[in-house]
Every structure is written in C-alpha cells, then in structure tokens.
Amino acid sequence: MKDQKKAYLFGLGAVACWSTVATAFKLSLGYFSPAQLLLVATISSLLLLLGMLAWQGKLTYLARYFHARPGYYLLLGLINPTLYYLVLFQAYDRLPAQQAQTLNYTWAITLTLLAVPFLGQKIRKQDWIAIVLGYLGAMVIATKGDLLSLDFEDPLGVALALFSTLLWAGYWILSARNQDDPLVALTLSFLLALPLVVLATALWSDFELTAWQGWVGAIYVGMFEMGFAFVMWLLAMRYAENTARISNLIFISPFASLLLLRFLVGEEIYPATLVGLSMIVAALLIQQLKVGAKRPHEQGSGTS
C-alpha cells in the first residue's frame, strides 16, 4: 500500500546514509588502502544482504537467478562493487573528499548520455542544457574555479572520479531492464564479486588489516552505503505516492555531506566546490522537469 509519510521517512533515512559516506570513505582511507576498504565493506554488506534475504525466505532465489543468467550477474558483480568502488576509493584517496564526492555526483548526467546508444532514448533540449551545466560545474570543482588555466591539482584523481560515474551509470544501464528482485540481484552481484575483491586486495594491497579505526569505517561503509541505504531507498520508492518528491530528497545529500566533511574531517570547503555543486544540482533538477519520457535514474537509486 502507498504511504507517502513512510516514503519520506525511508527516503530521508537513505539520504542520511549517503550524506555520511564521503566522510566515512575519507576517514577509513587513512587506515586502509582502497582495496582493503572494499574487501571489508563488501563482506560486511554481503552478510547484511544475506541476512535480509534469509529473513524474507529468498535465499533460494540466488541459485535460480545465477543459473538463469550467470554471465549477466558476473558482469554486474565485476562493475558493482568491484571496479566501481576500487576506482571511487582511489579517487577519494587522491583528492579532497569534497571534490571526489561532487564529481561523482555527475553520474546521472553520464547516464543520460549512455541511455542514447544502449537504451535507444533521445536527448531532450533540457538534457543538453543539463549536460553542459553539469560538466561545467564539474570543471569548476576540478580546477577550484580557475577554468581558464585548466590546472588540475591531481589530474589522475579527477579522471578516476569521472570514470567512476561511467561505471555507475553503466551499472544502472545494465540493471534498467532487469525484472529480477532488486535485493536478490544486488546480493548475487556482491556474492560473485567477493572472490574478485579478494584477488584485487592480494594484487594491489595486502591483508594486514590491523587498524581498528579502519575496521569501524569499512564496516560502516558496507552496512550503510552498500546495504541499508539501498534497502531504504527501495522501500521509499515502493511506498511513494509521488516518486518525484522522494527523488528530490537526494539533493539534500551533497550539501549535508559537505558540512560533515568540514566538521568531522576538517576539510576547508572551497568556494568553487559550492559553486560547482550548485551548478550540478541545478543541472539534475533541469533533467527532472516532466517533459517527454522519463529517464532511468528518475526511477532508480541515489548516489555515492
């Protein structure tokens, strides 16, 4: 049954989780490498998701879905969580969290571009405006406002943050027409990803996970960024009488996240970050204007 009040509560809960993860990423990376952080977070999230499926009596769906489309779910697991979070955590490791987070927030604009060749959708005039405005905002953030010089403090970090948007948008393109239970699908992709994450840790890091602070941060990331936030957002969409109103709650997240980065991490928030973020949010709001066909992200999840 629809219940807009419950939808708002679950939506705000998901947004609260997403607002804290940039801080959790940055603090955790002070103790764990990106691969180590991903390993502990993936295990934590997987245990949570398996527990939820057991409670719902859906564990048998995992084998059924895998046998039906093994290649598809292996590809999903390769993208999310493996490649997406490895790339995203590397970006956070190299850049101020405010830059990495805000650049990653352009994933919905990337999704609009990918939807043309892969989903056969057309780009509306307002989408072109949003694309230009959004990526201009990203450039303002990446150059700290010095657009004319195009002087990037860490070009590789910026490239990784933008590449993460391509991976995340690609994940949602692959998921757009998947009719399987979303919680089961996510759990299966994490289950299949775990050996890949272990291999990545062995190749690019090690298993010396001795810092308790890193464990606390990684478990938090796994439980809240990868687990509870996803489930709460699904519930918000299920209960929503008006999905657009719930979707707009997402825009609270990056501004709340900047406040947490300022007071918990101690990052000085650059004026260019606020300007660029405002441009990106304006671009995303322009995209949501109800003219023409809906985009996949208007029905989907939030952002990391």
Image: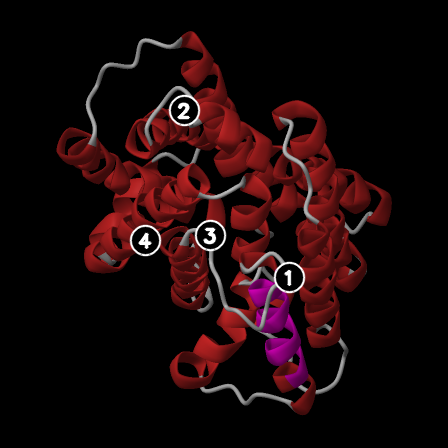
Contact, mark 3 vs mark 2 (Cβ under 8 Å):
no
Give the mark nearest the N terminus, 4 or 1.
4
The residue lying toward the viewer, choosing from 302 and 58, is 302
**Badge 3 amino acid:** Glu
**Badge 4 amino acid:** Ile
| Observer able to see residue 304 | no
Contact, mark 3 vs mark 1 (Cβ under 8 Å):
no
Q: Horizontally, is 208 left or right of 231 in the view?
A: left
Gap between marks 3 and 4, in whole Å? 28 Å
Gap between marks 2 and 4, in whole Å? 18 Å
Give the mark nearest the N terminus, 3 or 2.
2
- Where disc 4 sits, the SS reads helix
249 in relation to 109, above or below: above
Residue 252 position in % (x across, y down): 76, 48
Q: Quadrant of residue 38?
A: top left
The residue lying toward the viewer, choosing from 26 and 172, is 26
Give the residue at the far right of this rendering. Answer: 5
Q: Predominant secondary structure in magenta?
A: helix
47 in relation to 104, above or below: above
Q: Which residues are magenta?
A: 129-140
Mark 2 lies on residue: 44
Mark 4 lies on residue: 79
- Where disc 3 sits, the SS reads loop
**Badge 1 amino acid:** Gly
Mark 1 lies on residue: 145
Q: Which mark is residue 153?
A: 3
- Where disc 1 sits, the SS reads loop
23 in relation to 244, above or below: above
Q: Quadrant of residue 69?
A: bottom left
